Amino acid sequence: MTSLGEQALVGGLRHLQKMQEAISHNLANAASPGFKRRTVTAEAIGTRFVDALDAQAPQSRPELRYAESIDWSAGTFAPTEDHRHVAVDGDAFLAVRDEAGRTMLTRSGTLAVDARGTLRLSSGEAVLSDSGATIQLDTRQAGNFAIDPDGTVRGANLRAGDLADQTPVGRIGLFHHAAGNGQLRDLGRGLFQPELESAIRPAAPEDARLRQGYLEQSNVDALTEMVRMIGVQRGFQAQTKALTTVHSMRGEFATAFDR
């Protein structure tokens, strides 16, 4: 049986392992547009009794659950001069729908127009308007459309290539999650699914705008993550050494007690 000190150190090592996995994931996606860095937290979910050297004095420690959470802070906006790129400037998301009918939220803004004229993400999900409908363009406008800061989409004048005076074809919706971003499930590829679609609410106009010709970069600072990785590695070495020492001392005490 292990002592309270040994169990605490093992728990610390487990936490460091989870932190290392999150940091590695962050570094691997540091160059992925729109990626949000991961962090690891430890949450007490109860208490249980553990053995002690003195059986008359039982000890207890909290049971911990390690959870990976997302840092939702914005990344930098990089100009691309590509009309298919759009960045969400503010606390909001685009809403998209896949072929299975699932509605998801994203800040990834690489757009495309399919063969039917539907505005989509480059990964295939349809971009939704402020009313929850899809946005349709003339397929001949796919190579030249404009997006106003409020999300209004304008197709090019097919004769003159002029965007300024065109009738809007729809408005890209900007949304937030009423229950908080912590309730969103990460599906990968910059897509997040709410537990309840009813929690998706329109964002106030003053909360967010769109910036065409920009992409939001990841919010990972590679140098900071490397420093964190070094700290985790040193912590792992220190706790491993402490665990070895505690285990050795416990064995010596038991041997002396047996005498």
Image (spheres, rainbow, N blue to C red):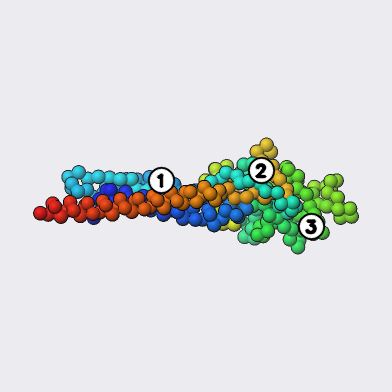
Whether tag 2 and tag 1 are in contact, CB under 8 A, the answer is no
User: Which mark, residue 89?
Assistant: 2
Mark yes or no: residue 137 visible: yes
At 30% across and 45% down in the image, what residue appears?
A: 61
169 vs 41, left or right, is right
Q: In the rendering, at what x and y percent does residue 18 appear?
A: 43, 53
In whole angstroms, how far apart are the C-alphas of marks 3 and 1? 50 Å
Are the two marked residues, 3 and 1, in contact with CB atoms closer than 8 angstroms? Answer: no
From this viewpoint, which residue is outermost toward the right? 159
Tag 2, which secondary structure? strand
- Using a 10 Å C-alpha cutoff, classify the residue at mark 2 as few (fewer than 14 neighbours), some (14 to 19) or many (20 or more): many
In which quadrant of the rendered image does the C terminus lie? bottom left
Q: Is residue 51 left or right of residue 145?
A: left
Instruction: From the top left corner, tell me how far across and down residue 103 is, in percent.
Output: 62, 53
Splitting the image into 4 quarters, where does residue 139 fall? bottom right
Provide the residue designation for mark 3.
143
Front-lying residue, 48 or 164: 164
Circle nearer the N terminus (3, 1): 1
Residue 205 sits in quarter: top right
Judged left or right of residue 10, residue 86 is right
Q: Residues within 10 Å of mark 1 (few under 14, many from 20)?
A: few
Mark 1: secondary structure? strand
Residues at discs 2 and 3 in contact (Cβ within 8 Å): no
Q: Earlier in the sequence, mark 2 or mark 3?
A: 2
| Amino acid type, callout 3 | Gly
Which residue is tagged 1? 43
Give the quadrant of the N terminus: bottom left
Viewer-side residue, 6 vs 140: 6
> Is disc 3 placed on a helix, strand or loop?
loop
What percent of the width, then of the height, locates residue 79? 70, 49
Amino acid on which the number 2 mark rests in the picture: Asp
Residue 221's mark?
A: none
